[in-house]
Amino acid sequence: MKIIYAGSPDASKITLEILYNNQAEYGFEIVGVLSNPDSAKGRHKELTPTPVAAFAMEKGLPVLKPEHLDAVAREEVQALNPDLLVSFAYGHIFGPKFLGIFPMGGINLHPSLLPKYRGCTPVPAAIKNRDKQTAATVQTLALKMDEGDIVAQQIIDLDGTETGESLLNNSAEIGARLILELLKDASENGKLKQGVSQTGESSYTNTLTKDDGRIDWTLSAAEIEAQIRAYNPNPGCWTMENQLPLKIIAASFIDDNKYSKEKPGTVVEFNKGQGIFIQTGKGILAVLELQRQGKKNMKYKDFMNGARDFVGTILE
C-alpha cells in the first residue's frame, strides 16, 4: 500500500519519522511527501525547507512543495500512484479533485476531542481553558474542515503542566501509533477502517496572533499561568514594562491574598525560592522565566540580579 504524507511543522515531522521507521512492519510505503514551500528564515533570510520537507529529503523521499493544490500539483501527486493520503498540520485544504486521486481516501491527525476545537489551534485552546482531557484523533479527510468520521482516538489526560509545545509533540507521537495500526489494517484488508460520525457540540479555534499573548493582569493567576503554558512557544505571552515589551515564558500560580490590595500587574515581591511575585486579579503569579526586549531568556534569579528595582514596577 502506497501513501503520501502531508505535513509541515516540527510536530508533523515527529509523526512522519515514526511512520517512516515502521513502514515494513506495518505493510505500507511512503512514496512521497507534501509540504509547504520553503520560507525565508534567519538574519540572512535564507530559504529554508519545513521540518517535514527537510526530514523527507534527508531520507531520499520525493518531496512536493506546491503553492496551491492545482492541476499541476495533482498531476505530480498522481504520478506517484498513491493509495492513501495521510495528513497532519499541512496547512492546505484538500479539494474533491485532489482527494479523488487516492483510491482509499485520506486520514488526518487532529489533536483534540473532536468535534471540540476544530481548526488550527486546538492544543493551545485545551491548555488555556484548563481542560482535564484532550485527545489525539484520526479522522477521515472531509471537504469541510475537521468534520470527517473518527477512525481512531486516544484520550490524553492533562495534569496542568503541559505547554503548547509539549502537548502537541505528545499528540504527534500518540497519533502516529494510531495511524500505524490503521495503515496495518488497511494494508491487510484493502480498505480503510470505517469511522463513526462526530457527535456532540462543536467548537472552533482560530489562528493565534501576537496580540493573543498579551497578558490581562485583571484575570486570575491561574488563568494567566494557563495562558502562558498554552502559548509557549508561539505566539508567546508578554506584557509592557515601562513602555517596553517583556515576555513571560514560565510561571506558576499561588492562591494568596497577601497583596490583594495592590493593583493587578504590580511586581510585589522577589521570593528566592518561588519566583518573582506579581499580583493579579485573583492570586499571585510567580514568574520563573522571562525576557526583556533584545535580551536572552533568563531564570528569575538571574533576571533580578540585574533588575534590583523591578519590585514595585506596575506592568501594563
Image (cartoon, helix red, strand yellow):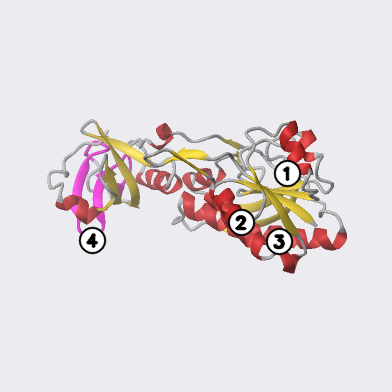
Find residue 142 and report its image quarter: top right
Q: Residue at x 61, y 56 (%)?
A: 15
Can residue 67 be seen by looking at this rendering? Answer: yes
Q: Residue at x 80, y 48 (%)?
A: 81
Q: Could you tell which of marks 2 and 3 lies nearer the N-terminus? A: 2
Cβ–Cβ under 8 Å for marks 3 and 4: no
Residue tagged 1: 199
Q: Nearer the viewer, residue 219 or 136?
A: 136
- Element type at marker 1? loop
Residue 176 % position (x, y): 65, 58
Residue tagged 4: 273
Q: How far apart are labels 2 and 1 at the CA level?
A: 26 Å
Amino acid, disc 4: Gly
Q: Residues within 10 Å of mark 3 (few under 14, many from 20)?
A: many
Q: Residue at x 60, y 45 (%)?
A: 89
Q: Nearer the viewer, mark 1 or mark 3?
A: 3
Amino acid, disc 1: Thr
**The magenta segment:** 261-286
Q: How far apart are labels 4 and 1 at the CA level?
A: 47 Å
Residue tagged 2: 15
Residue tagged 3: 180
Residue 167 % position (x, y): 51, 54
| Quadrant of the rendering where the N terminus is positioned | bottom right
Q: Could you tell which of marks 2 and 4 lies nearer the N-terminus? A: 2
Q: Nearer the viewer, mark 2 or mark 1?
A: 2
- Element type at marker 3? helix
Q: Nearer the viewer, residue 98 or 237?
A: 98
